[in-house]
Image: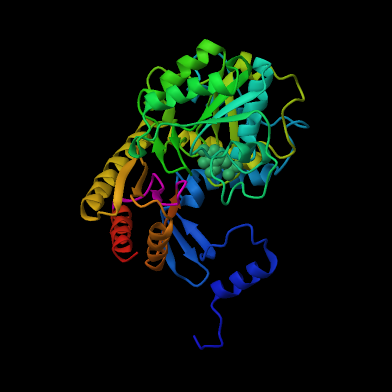
Amino acid sequence: MSLTEQSASARVSAERSRYVARGVSTPKLVVESAGGARVKDVDGNTFLDFAGGIACQNTGHGFGPVVAAVHEQADRYLHQCFMVGTYEPYVEVCRRLAELSPCGTGEQRSILVKSGAEAIENALKIARVATGRPAVIVFDNAFHGRTLLTMTMTSKVKPYKAGFGPFAPEVYRTPAPYPYRGITSDDAIAALEHLFKGDVDPETVACVVLEPVQGEGGFIPMPPDFPARLHEICRTHGILYVDDEVQSGVGRTGTMWAIEHYAGVEPDLLVSGKSLGGGLPLAGVTGRQEIVDAVPPGGLGGTFGGNPLSCAAAVAVLDAVSQPAFLAAATRLGATMRERLDGLASRHAAIGEVRGLGSMLAFELAEQTPDRAQAVVAAAFDRSLLLLACGLYGNVIRLLPPLTIADDELDEGMTILEEALTEG
Ligand SMILES: Cc1ncc(COP(=O)(O)O)c(C=O)c1O
């Protein structure tokens, strides 16, 4: 290419800078196509994808059953608005969510929306009406979205909150367990009791919202005892337990929902999203009938919520992921990834901890600055591996390959990761 010739990526990036709000952060990658665990850019370079559009590709790019279901649905109708015309794909997703729900036995109902944040907002609406209470308790290192309420609930100032206040009222924060940084389940329980003494009357709390494995906050799995202990406290005070599985759900941890790894807890509301739609926008709130139906007709909804194409995709996703063989493969993948990461940690002193659940794995760099993690992500990109950092300090590298990735592709990615860590 001559010096005056621009690559296709450079041309699109320049147009992007010219026309797209800079508040939407700008990656280097300009995509042409994607399939399985690979993404091809507009200049013909191929990348191995350990990012999955931020945890949205558990079934891989262009998963056959999803693409077929979307094509078929596209030929029938694209939109109805579920509040104007009932359509079967929406009902079918809700049926599957009911059958797969971790929220106990008995009839389950769901509402479908367009994003994780919108689903969290709806979970809050439902919890408030069901309990008649206003407050919500959230945790350190939480990420629940970018709308006013969910941004308030999110636990990272820059870039998610800085300058965007005033924030929503009646949101209270308390420490979550983070054993690597010295916060145990006992500490977190004590802090919650302290919150009830000092800041908020538990009798005014509608719900707690917790990710079983905190995602953006650094892939921090809750210790085995914590969800059940929190649940018990919720029971005592009539508080609902909302399980945010937007990132940890849909097979990522080797079970349909990460909360299934925890004994003694039955959430009141499940929030799902991301990989649920197989790449199309879909999220949901699921719970027992008496809780979800506390909201009268018309109180929940939205023009595009549960779009038919997204629902057709989700039916295919849920049918595939709920197969025992699919989940067993996800568990095996997680074991292989962890072994590789443990090996990496034994050779690289910068790694402070390898952690996660199933195939939702990450390593935290001991130093609490983003620089090294950013360098590793950049070095991986230069070697054609897409990676994401996370964590309050941006010092965690998370791995989100498709659960369908081939052994040799995983091996290739892990080898590049080590090279990137050595160089970065
Ligand atoms: C746990 C969790 N909850 C909620 C959200 C918000 O989802 P969305 O970006 O679809 O609004 C995210 C997004 O990363 C998430 O990880």
Give residue 408's position: percent from left, percent from top.
29, 55
Q: Quadrant of ligand 1?
A: top right
Q: Tell me: 4 left or right of 260.
A: right
Q: Is residue 89 above or below residue 69?
A: above
Give residue 103's position: percent from left, percent from top.
50, 20
Residue at left 32%, top 41%?
334
Which of the 4 image quarters holds residue 181?
top left
Give residue 213's position: percent from left, percent from top.
43, 35
Which of the 4 image quarters holds residue 178?
top left
Q: Nearer the viewer, residue 153 or 191?
A: 191
Which of the 4 image quarters holds residue 81?
top right
Q: Tell me: 331 left or right of 79.
A: left
Residue at left 48%, top 33%?
211
Q: Is residue 127 above or below residue 173?
A: above
Residue at left 33%, top 39%?
180
Q: Magenta span covers which residues?
A: 391-407
Confirm whether the magenta stretch covers residue 371.
no
Q: Residue furthest front?
A: 198
Query: Visible in this render: residue 415?
Result: yes
Q: Nearer the viewer, residue 381 or 104?
A: 381
Q: How many marks?
A: 0
